[in-house]
Image (spheres, rainbow, N blue to C red):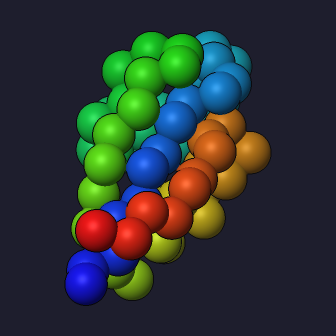
Amino acid sequence: MAKKLKIKQVKSAIGSKPKQRATLRALGLRRMNSERLHDDSPVIRGMIFAVQHMVEVREINE
């Protein structure tokens, strides 16, 4: 069973640094309360760490 991560943007990117805004876009998060499902990998975990104050993460077993 592969683990998935459900990532939800809970804080606006307005006023954040350009690199953090780019990370949100790369995760597929376009606006507040948008959600995306990603495979659990070190790359995605690193991206989440960079914007951890703006997102909520839940682990899902599929």
Identity of the residue drawn at 65% across and 27% down = 10
**Image spot of residue 3 (x, y percent):** 35, 75
How many marks can you see?
A: 0
Give left or right: position of 59 versus 15. left
Compared with residue 43, is residue 6 higher up or lower down, i.e. above or below?
Answer: above
Q: Nearer the viewer, residue 21 or 33?
A: 33
**Image spot of residue 59 (x, y percent):** 51, 64
Identity of the residue drawn at 63% across and 45% down = 56
Residue 43 in view here: no
Q: Quadrant of residue 13?
A: top right
Compared with residue 3, is residue 49 higher up or lower down, i.e. above or below?
Answer: above
Image quadrant where one finds the N terminus: bottom left
Q: Nearer the viewer, residue 14 or 59?
A: 59
Identity of the residue drawn at 41% across and 32% down = 35
Compared with residue 23, is residue 1 higher up or lower down, i.e. above or below?
Answer: below
Outermost residue on the right side: it is 53
Identity of the residue drawn at 66% across and 37% down = 54
